[in-house]
């Protein structure tokens, strides 16, 4: 191996570690679930998550509001171009590019994601149809990108892939809707957004929970098709968010606007352990 390749390999490793720090900092639930993924899959998921998180931060207030639109446009262009470039001065973008090349992420999924992020810069309320479009770009395509990670070098039929893609979209949508309900206080009081009606009632909440449960159930029907390298991690994340759904259902709508629901760490660990045991009994 040439000296150049030695240096590049070392830079690759540093960049991957940098991306890993992003998920550790921002999401204890996904970080815990990702520990149950195989090493290669976990690395690629962390690299993808880090890119997505930075886009989120641009629109959620880390960037100055007047600078956010141009920053988001620039970042989208960088992300779309990243796979064709072997070295990036930004370690997170460098790590993302490694994964995007290996997993062959479709440009249309990336564009759909950034389209939803762009809505957060100017749109404050949503019709039902607009919310469906937002959820597709902000969450369902992320599920599809994760599935692309899981299926690298995995032999699957076209029918199996289609079934798993539908499940990935359902799971992504469920996760997003749960986060909408968890973040009612911040979205409305801090960011000035209302994905759900501002006079959110218990009836509205029950309807949302029923929808989430349908999405989760649809995702579970295809979980046995996932490769063993990914199954336990996906099941753990699903079970963690199912627990959040139960807690949301037991919480009055008015209370959801004043505090963020969370699962205690010891319960998260127990859920992850149970998911690992369950996944080992599942047959593909």
Image (cartoon, rainbow, N blue to C red):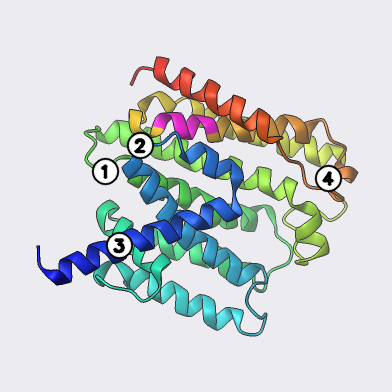
Q: Are marks 1 and 3 in contact (CB under 8 Å)?
A: no
Is residue 81 toward the left or the right of residue 23 in the image?
left
Q: Secondary structure at mark 1?
A: loop
Query: Which residue was labeled with disc 2?
Result: 38
**Can the viewer see residue 118?**
yes
Q: How far apart in space, not on screen, are marks 4 and 2 (Cα)?
A: 36 Å
Residue 10 location in percent, x, y? 27, 63
N-term mark: 1 or 4:
1
Question: Does 215 sit left or right of 74 as displayed?
Answer: right
Per the rendering, the mark at residue 256 is 4
Q: Residues within 10 Å of mark 3 (few under 14, many from 20)?
A: some
Tell me the SS state at disc 2: loop
- Mark carried by residue 12: 3
| Residue picked out by circle 1 | 152
**In which image quadrant can residue 252 be found?**
top right
Decide whether the magenta segment is chiefly helix, strand or loop. helix
């Amino acid at each position: 191996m040439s000296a150049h390749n030695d240096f590049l390999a070392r830079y690759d490793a540093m960049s991957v570690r940098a991306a890993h720090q992003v998920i550790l900092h921002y999401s204890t639930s996904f970080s815990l679930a990702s520990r149950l993924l195989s090493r290669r899959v976990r690395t690629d998921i962390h690299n993808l998550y880090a890119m997505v998180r930075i886009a989120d931060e641009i629109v959620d207030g880390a960037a100055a509001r007047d600078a956010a639109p141009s920053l988001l446009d620039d970042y989208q262009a960088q992300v779309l171009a990243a796979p064709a470039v072997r070295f990036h001065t930004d370690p997170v973008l460098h790590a993302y590019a490694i994964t995007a090349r290996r997993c062959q992420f479709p440009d249309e999924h990336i564009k759909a994601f950034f389209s939803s992020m762009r809505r957060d810069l100017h749109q404050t309320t949503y019709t039902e149809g607009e919310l469906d479009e937002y959820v597709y770009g902000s969450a369902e395509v992320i599920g599809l990108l994760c599935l692309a990670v899981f299926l690298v070098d995995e032999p699957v039929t076209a029918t199996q892939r289609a079934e798993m893609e539908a499940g990935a979209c359902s799971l992504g949508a469920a996760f997003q809707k749960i986060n909408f309900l968890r973040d009612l206080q911040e979205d409305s009081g801090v960011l000035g957004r209302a994905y759900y009606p501002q006079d959110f009632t218990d009836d509205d909440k029950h309807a949302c929970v029923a929808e989430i449960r349908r999405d989760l159930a649809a995702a579970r029907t295809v979980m046995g098709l996932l490769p063993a390298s990914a199954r336990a991690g996906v099941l753990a994340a699903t079970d963690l968010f199912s627990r959040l759904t139960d807690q949301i259902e037991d919480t009055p709508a008015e209370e959801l606007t004043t505090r963020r629901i969370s699962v205690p760490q010891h319960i998260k660990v127990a859920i992850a352990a149970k998911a690992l045991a369950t996944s080992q009994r599942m047959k593909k």
